[in-house]
């Protein structure tokens, strides 16, 4: 028999269908009982009328419990007042398993409790909506690069290189040596452009972040384009086109989810190019004008980012950073070698940095100096230096953290709900 899903139910009006899923809720009024039923694609109300079913089926009204797994059959009919606009006149029910004492009840639970039950919490309405938005953010990210001539070139997870500094590396025993879990695929993507010109990688990345914030995970997913013959300005063009595409896609394809999440989409609708571009120096001036006691040369903290981004109605791109604050691979500004050609994209509404990137140092000898200056071991970077010996070109790229982007688009408070099974300093389970 054809496997029918609630998301397609409109096509079956007046017909008899069989649905497979779980009991969400049961409500009884004498000779009739109602089941809210979900199958992963949506919810539908099933109605059981005593005179229309066998006594065994009717008695299930008092036996079935939240999250029991059942297969139900009946006739689809339009019912405007019902969830999703349709309901099912149930004729038969097959019980697969009766779930007893499901721990997550409609009452309020604390976040720690919910996170401990993340494997079940994922079934709840808001969590379901967030993960569906995440899926669309990932799909839109891939589509954007696929449609713009980028080749997907995967990068390794086990590496010998530190890309983003040595302070937050995860070490792994690797036979008789040590490997790191990758912090970013960037260095490898810089190799891939030599073969493919415009590439992207997309995968999990790892940082032993000891800070406990609303924005940090120790395992997160990053999509990273890298482009040969591309300077910082063109890189920013790509970043704003990319973000606008992802947001536009979600506005169109996640309407139901954003409604469930009560996301005010007004601010998201404004996300179209061009994005404002300000230098680090100008951003510092904004902080000073707002009375912030900020030390020039520091990275911006969350509160600083909120003040800077609140000046604008769309994401703001902060470029030309004090080189000392940034990674070893960043190219310096010709006009002022104290500045690195890096760019951070800050989301509006206080969601902070969603993209980091910039133009890369393409000169061999300068790069050698930088590696030494950053106290990085030379040997694991030999292959990377080769790229500057055999046809080096100006090139740029960036990385967008999927979870940061989903946090912003869904408008939720904490990044931990944007990934199915979050990893943080205090959480390795479930
Ligand atoms: O700014 P980051 O560190 O830049 C890089 O890794 C570059 N190598 C990327 C590139 O140029 N190819 O990280 C990029 C983005 C951040 O803007 C943020 O969205 C996300 O990755 N990110 C995190 N997300 C969640 N938890 C963390 N601990 C994160 N650290 C960075
Ligand atoms: Mg960054």
Image (tube, grey):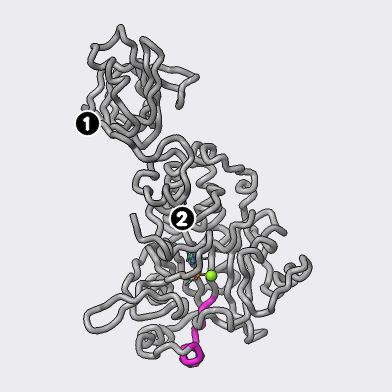
Task: Residue 46 in the image: state x and y as whole percent.
Answer: 36, 21
Secondary structure at numbered mark 1? strand
Q: Does the magenta portion include 286?
A: no
Task: Residue 254 in the image: state x and y as whole percent.
Answer: 49, 41
N-term-proximal mark, 1 vs 2: 1
Secondary structure mostly seen in the magenta stretch: helix
Mark 2 CB within 8 Å of ligand 1: no
Q: Which mark is residue 301?
A: none
Mark 1 CB within 8 Å of ligand 1: no
Q: Which mark is residue 416?
A: 2
* Residue drawn at x 34%, y 11% as measured from the top left: 49
Nearest the eye: 124 or 29: 29
Task: State the residue position of label 1.
Answer: 96
Instruction: Tell me the magenta residue range.
Output: 359-374
Task: Residue 17 in the image: state x and y as whole percent.
Answer: 29, 22
* Residue drawn at x 37%, y 17% as measured from the top left: 33
């Amino acid at each position: 028999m054809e496997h029918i899903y609630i998301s397609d139910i409109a096509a079956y009006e007046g017909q008899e269908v069989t649905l497979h899923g779980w009991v969400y809720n049961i409500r009884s009024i004498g000779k009739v009982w109602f089941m809210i039923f979900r199958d992963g694609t949506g919810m539908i109300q099933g109605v059981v009328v005593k005179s229309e079913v066998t006594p065994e089926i009717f008695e299930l009204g008092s036996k079935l419990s939240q999250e029991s797994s059942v297969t139900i059959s009946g006739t689809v009919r339009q019912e405007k007042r019902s969830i999703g606009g349709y309901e099912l006149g149930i004729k038969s029910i097959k019980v697969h398993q009766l779930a007893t004492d499901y721990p997550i009840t409609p009452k309020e639970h604390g976040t720690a409790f919910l996170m401990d039950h993340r494997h079940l919490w994922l079934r709840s309405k808001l969590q379901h909506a967030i993960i569906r938005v995440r899926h669309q953010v990932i799909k839109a990210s891939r589509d954007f690069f696929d449609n713009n001539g980028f080749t997907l070139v995967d990068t390794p997870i086990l590496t010998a290189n530190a890309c983003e500094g040595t302070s937050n590396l995860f070490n792994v025993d690797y036979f008789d040596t040590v490997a790191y879990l990758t912090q970013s695929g960037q260095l490898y993507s810089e190799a891939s452009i030599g073969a493919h010109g415009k590439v992207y990688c997309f995968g999990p990345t790892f940082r032993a972040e000891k800070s406990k914030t609303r924005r940090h995970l120790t395992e997160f997913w990053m999509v990273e384009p890298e482009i040969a013959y591309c300077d910082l300005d063109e890189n920013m063009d790509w970043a704003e086109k990319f973000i606008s595409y992802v947001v536009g896609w979600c506005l169109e394809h996640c309407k139901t989810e954003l409604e469930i999440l009560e996301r005010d989409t007004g601010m998201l609708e404004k996300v179209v190019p061009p994005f404002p571009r300000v230098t680090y120096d100008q951003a510092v001036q904004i902080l000073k004008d707002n009375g912030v006691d900020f030390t020039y040369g520091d990275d911006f903290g969350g509160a600083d980012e909120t003040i800077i981004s609140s000046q604008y109605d769309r994401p703001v791109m902060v470029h030309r950073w004090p080189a000392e604050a940034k990674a070893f691979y960043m190219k310096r500004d010709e006009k002022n070698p104290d500045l690195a050609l890096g760019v951070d994209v800050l989301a509006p509404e206080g969601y902070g940095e969603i993209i980091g990137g910039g133009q890369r140092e393409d000169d061999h000898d300068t790069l050698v100096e930088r590696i030494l200056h950053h106290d990085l071991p030379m040997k694991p970077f030999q292959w990377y230096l080769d790229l500057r010996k055999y046809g080096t070109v100006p090139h740029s790229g960036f990385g967008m953290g999927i979870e940061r982007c989903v946090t912003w688009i869904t408008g939720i408070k904490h990044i931990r709900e944007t990934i199915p099974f979050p990893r943080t300093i205090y959480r390795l389970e479930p």
